[in-house]
Amino acid sequence: MKKAAFALIVLILALALPARADVALDIKLHFFGPAVNQGAGSLVATSFSLKPLRLKGQDPGEMQVAFAPEALLARLQKAFNNPGLALLTSGDLAWRVDGPPSVMQVVQVNNRDYALVLTPRPAPGVVNFKVGVVEGGEKKIKNVLLDTEIVLPDREVAMLGFRDSSENSYFVAFYVQARRDSLAKDAMRLAGGDKPRKINDVKPVFPAEAREKGIEGAVVLEAVIDASGRVKAVQTLSSPAPVLTEAAKAAVGQWVFAPYLVDGKAKEVAFTVTINFRLDQKNKAKPAGDALTRLEDSQKPKMVKKVDPVYPEEALKNKLQGVVRLEAVIDESGKVKSLRALESPDPLLTEAAIDAVKNWEYEPFVKDGKAKPVAFTVTVTFALK
């Protein structure tokens, strides 16, 4: 299969929101499968990575975790009572927040192609991964074998299994062997619900612009407080739109916490903060006294006016691409009344998609002879040429 064909997989599987901090991850990946082909002849396994998604020069001294593929193989053979499993190939992948949203490893086994796509979203103490595996046929995607999301804590290994179209069992193991985060490199990271006590709270203001555009969602930030408990820095891990990001940062930057003590000494610490912006029913344009009907893709009314989205210059510069999924609500006349982001590779693309879709128009949705307001999903694809 041509490498260009696999580039399309990123648009299908890489829908998780990327981190918006200065973070870099070095990922080690192992691919296990049958040691002997069920047909005639020997099994041949090779692998390659798409050049735009691979960086070299990793420093082994920075490894946070170390595990031997032989040890993982022994565990798999024992757990599944399958001595025929073998290590087919290994790969080193590097992800940066200012690069593509996903890293990809393409494995070829007996002339059959498997594309493994990892889309990371780093958070303090963990990395959230969207994991996809696609089987290729003659220059096209044949089957999606795995599409899931996991939370991988630091210093732990993820091991996932799947079957191909011929019922062969394969396993992929990966871990973060090095992580670099410049914002809070000197701060102690707090995981889970371990956070300092807040003593001064400032509520975020829901921006009028976001209300008018029907934008809502959760903004996930990482806050760093100094030894006195004051917020030293704030960075964005994920957000549905820049307008909500700025509102969340403006509030969190004014928070004050009780100093975090370790062995009686105040420490500089970093932790995750989530700010939820939720529209009320009026802003969602839901009709009073009448349940809003949500349509499947096959039920969507016919579009009569479409405005193409404008690719943001900053997104082009940073080589951002992917699919934005929105929920649109149209009124009885077919005009778009509100939009909210469901999934997006980047807030810049979210805003560009909303600016275009808000001008779309549809034929009225008629049920029992009466036009009704309805909601349905809209997708906007941004692809670099």
Image (cartoon, grey):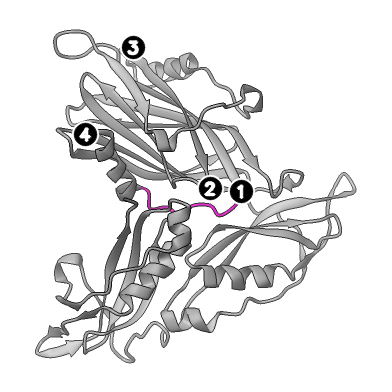
Residue span colored magenta: 14-21
List the residue tagged with mark 1: 22
Name the secondary structure under disc 4: strand
Kind of residue at badge 4 = Gly
Kind of residue at badge 2 = Val
Please check the rendered image and state whether residue 249 is part of the magenta-colored stretch, yes or no: no
Instruction: Please name whichever residue, 383 or 284, is drawn nearer the observer in this view of the structure.
Output: 383
Residue 136 disc label: 4
Q: Is residue 258 above or below residue 106?
A: below
Q: Tag count in the figure? A: 4
Kind of residue at badge 3 = Pro
Q: Please report whichever mark, 1 or 2, sits nearer to the chain's N-terminal start.
A: 1
Kind of residue at badge 1 = Asp
Q: Are marks 1 and 2 in contact (CB under 8 Å)?
A: yes
Tag nearer the camera, 4 or 3: 4
Q: Give x and y (percent) for residue 192.
A: 63, 50
Q: Residue at x 50, y 39 (%)?
A: 95
Q: Please report whichever mark, 4 or 1, sits nearer to the chain's N-terminal start.
A: 1
List the residue tagged with mark 3: 83
Q: Quadrant of residue 260?
A: bottom right
**Inter-mark Cα distance, 4 to 2:** 28 Å
Q: Give x and y (percent) for residue 152.
A: 52, 40
Name the secondary structure under disc 2: loop
Q: Please report whichever mark, 2 or 3, sits nearer to the chain's N-terminal start.
A: 3
Q: Quadrant of residue 346?
A: bottom left
Q: Are marks 4 and 1 in contact (CB under 8 Å)?
A: no
